Image (cartoon, rainbow, N blue to C red):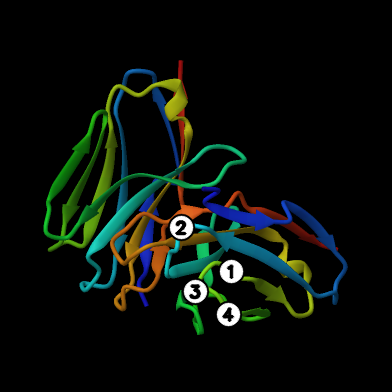
Amino acid sequence: NAGVTQTPKFQVLKTGQSMTLQCAQDMNHEYMSWYRQDPGMGLRLIHYSVGAGITDQGEVPNGYNVSRSTTEDFPLRLLSAAPSQTSVYFCASRKGQHTEAFFGQGTRLTVV
Amino acid sequence: GENVEQHPSTLSVQEGDSAVIKCTYSDSASNYFPWYKQELGKRPQLIIDIRSNVGEKKDQRIAVTLNKTAKHFSLHITETQPEDSAVYFCAARGYTGNQFYFGTGTSLTVIP
């Protein structure tokens, strides 16, 4: 049982490049979310999903896309990277509404 | 959506003293309030949570109190130890129950 696995751990992009951050969980959780963590701003919700085929926007969705084709996977796509997207990204999953969220180990993204 | 405010942003205490972190929330429909601890360079992990039908919950040296009328909840750590040094985040479940909103974090330093 690996929990929530994110790849890659580190990434450097040039402005305008696109990439996909991968997130997979093996706990059969319905709820999955993507957060970005910036100094002094806590964890801000980008997108979330309540099950396969269902996604919705969080607080800061602009510049990001998601899809949920399976229960296990919830990739985050950066369409055209900008320096403002330099951040640490966390994927999280949970079983239900009142249950613990399990986080991946994070992806440190730098856009130059 | 929900708005969660957290104070203080930094907190230093002497080993053995108590630490208190406070959060307020805006949505009166929120009914689940977890606290996460994030050690340097690591992922956030749940340390304690409380539901709205409970006013207080304890787990060894950690306790959380909830005042639904005033829409605030607090984390109390007693007999602090150096290993308690970390960033602590409060969160509240959004009105639909599908997403969590996090506070901006408190950096706690326990001085030996």
Where residue B12 sits in the image (x, y, percent)? 43, 30
Asked whether disc 4 touches disc 2, contact meaning CB atoms under 8 Å apart, the reply is: no
Dot 4 falls on a residue whose secondary structure is loop
Q: Which residue is mark 3?
A: A48
Label 3 or label 4, whichever lies nearer to me, is 4
Q: Are marks 1 and 4 in contact (CB under 8 Å)?
A: yes
Residue A27 circle label? 2
Would residue B23 be found to the left or right of residue A56 on screen?
left
* Residue that badge 4 annotates: A69
Same chain letter for marks 2 and 1:
yes
Please report whichever mark, 3 or 4, sits nearer to the chain's N-terminal start.
3
The chain containing the residue under callout 2 comes to A
| In the rendered image, residues at marks 3 and 4 fall on the same chain | yes
| Chain containing mark 4 | A
In the picture of the structure, the residue carrying the numbered disc 1 is A73
The image shows residue A5, relative to residue B16, as above or below, that is below
Secondary structure of residue under mark 1? loop
Say whether mark 3 and mark 1 are on the same chain: yes
